[in-house]
Image (cartoon, rainbow, N blue to C red):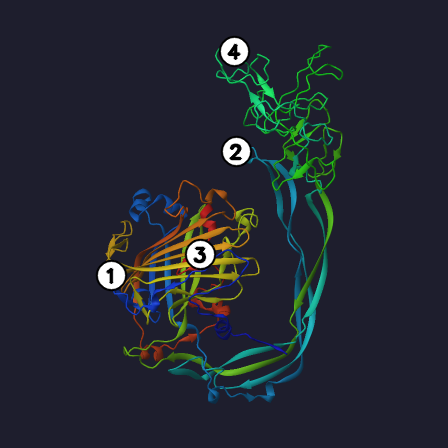
Amino acid sequence: MKKQIKYFFLLAILAIININCSFEDNDSGSNKSTKSYNSLRNDNLGDKTGQVEDYFYNFENNVEANFFRYNPSLMANYESYSDYYSLFNEDPTNMVYKTFPDYLVSMKPEDASQFTQRTYIDSLSVAGRVSSDSVQISSTPFKNLEALEWNLDAEPSLQRYKLSNSDWVTDDTIINYDDIYDVSAYWAVVDTPFIQEGILFVDSSEWKDTNYVFLADDQIMFQNSFEFTKKQLSSDSLVFRINTDCNDNNLYDEAESGVQDFNGDNDSQDVLFEYLDNNNNGVYDAGDDPIEDYNGDNIYSVVFEFIDRGNQIWDPGEPYYDIDSSGTYDLNEPFQDRNCNGKWDGEESYTDSDGSQTYTAGEDFIDEGNGMFDDSETYYGGDPSKLFSIGDKPNSLLAHWSDQYTPEVILDISPGDDITNRWGNLYENIIEEVEIVDLQRQYVDDVDSLITLFTRKEVGHILEKNENGSFEPQDYYITKSEWSKVSGGQTERFYNYHIFHQPYHLNQVSHPSYFLPVGFYFSPNEIESGFWSKNKLESEVLYYTYNGQLRAGESIDTSYYDTTDVAIYFIEKSYRVESDSNVVVPAGHRPDMSLSAKDTTFTDCFKISQTTTMTMLGSGVEFGQRTESWLAKNIGLVKSEVFIRWTEHPYDSDYTANNNYLDTLNQAWIGFNRIELNSVAIQESNNVFRKMAHPVKNIRLQNIKDEQNFNFDPFYASKQHGIHTIDLRELIE
């Protein structure tokens, strides 16, 4: 069977859009439960109602609304516009939101054979057309490890080696090829009428062409091998090794031998203090309180129930980095824990027979243990000579033992650096260079045939009058928001497109976006916005309506599983509508821009609250988003706030929920984005005469970059809610 692809957005979007109020997945492998509540089943909620286009926007009108836009730092530090203006004597970032009623993204299809019958065009049909094309094959990007650097700036318990990486290393090649296929041409009045009812206007003076490509079942395969020299951590992975040789003798040892169960707890593994060392001098004296003479020797001291085994060799002080150059160890200084007791140990006492003031082989010493009971030592990979385990963090401080009595801590490791451990083992190239071959394949569609269909251009669509006597199109409307920010003296411009349609409720069409947790990102520079997006556009309810009406008291809860190529996400959504008669925003008229905007109070409003919780199954990481929006009659959106929360932030743990900012549900929300209406201009144009005088232009999204009215800005995938754009990079600005 041939695969048919239509290069025309309006059919593509209609094929992928699914209008779903709730979903349910019976995945037995998950412990998540679905929930569902829908007040739309109730015909009368007994409270305030209003048509959604009266409170949000009538997309048949020309709307230009200006909003003050507050990023996360502004939301955290300035509760109101007046707070901000009084400090800086200027406005926050201005965001402009516009509708484009003269542009329709698409219309709904309906069979109409009298308009869609196709006629073959011999003069434009070609057999065996040769089309030259090319395919680009790119290697898998990677980063070279340039150095390991111990992070002294972190808290002692969180210190580890930081990986200093290069920029992305990649390569590509272009392969040229010829594709041979047949071309057929047809004409018809319209491709499909793209309407369910009403009148379709077509331009009889202009033809447009649409290409249908039929593909062979099997794709064409191209491949190329890329060769690189890669710098990476060696297979030894010393920085991940956790020492398990707890008596530091380089030999496997069984558990330490018990002596006597002095405290009667049925083991012989305790270290018992026979007194309270009230003055912390390490010995029992007149100022201390006796506890119990466990061993009955009439001496209050510390009693071991076991033989605290040494290693029969003299041990120097554990290697540490002397941050303050004091010559003595301080608690904030990193060290190499060689005996597994979690604290720094100095050198063992010895008799300086030769007066050298340093230990000399053969001198008597006190062979000390580690002050704790040691069970049988563990080892890695079934080899008793590998007395270590492998951790998931590079927090094992390395030391060079070229001199067995004066080891040297290594804070910085470069490619080619070697390390000798205490037992004389040489580890070469902690950062090694390896030759890799990256075989990449690229598959391209093999065009079997191409059909070009010439049709008249659709210029407008008017429905029959509804019961209210108005004309309401059933179309997809494209709108746009734009704003600029100044950073470092440079002005950076931002924009986003927002697509809406109203089949039953007010829906928003976008690329569904999902988060990735810690481990997928290593820095904010490695992400686009904090989220990844599906390739296909989908339709999702923005505002639920009952027969086109917003209703105070509306309450809808839904949940479902979304299986993606990355992970399975459990989605929970909560939707609430309230009546609000006191919404204050800085939307007052001001004759002079040097003056602050005046507050305006809107009394006829709906407040809509929406909360989404997204849980990545398996990891259990949660992302939450709460949006609170206020809609004023005949004005539109006057205020909207977005809050987010994490159980594990994608790249910065400082933004992960903590006990300092918990709400009543034990959740920590961060104010991410707030917009407040500054001004709005609405030009009503929802009548049939305007449509006939200014016919609607049907536009493909891929061609929007060619339109002057859209400032030649291309469409791109983004995470958005309503007219909010959610970009986590704003958290670090």
- The secondary element bearing badge 4 is classed as loop
Q: Are marks 1 and 3 in contact (CB under 8 Å)?
A: no
Gap in angstroms between the C-alphas marked 3 and 2: 38 Å
| Picture residue at 73% right of the left edge, 22% below the top | 312
Residue type beneath disc 2: Glu
Is label 1 or label 3 in front? Answer: 1
Q: Which mark is residue 155?
A: 2
Position in image of residue 408 (x %, y %): 67, 27
Q: Earlier in the sequence, mark 2 or mark 1?
A: 2
Residue 147, given in percent of the width and then of the height, sits at 64, 39
User: Image quarter for residue 479?
Assistant: bottom left
Q: Dot 4 corresponds to which residue?
A: 285
Residue at image mark 1: 604
What residue would you read off at disc 3? 494
49 relative position to 413: left or right: left
Q: Nearer the viewer, mark 4 or mark 3?
A: 4
For the residues labelled 2 and 1, the Cα–Cα distance comes to 53 Å
Secondary structure found at label 1: loop
Task: Name the residue at 44% across, 53% down.
Answer: 624
Q: Are marks 4 and 3 in contact (CB under 8 Å)?
A: no
C-alpha span from label 4 to label 3: 73 Å
Q: Please provide percent x and percent y for residue 152.
A: 56, 32
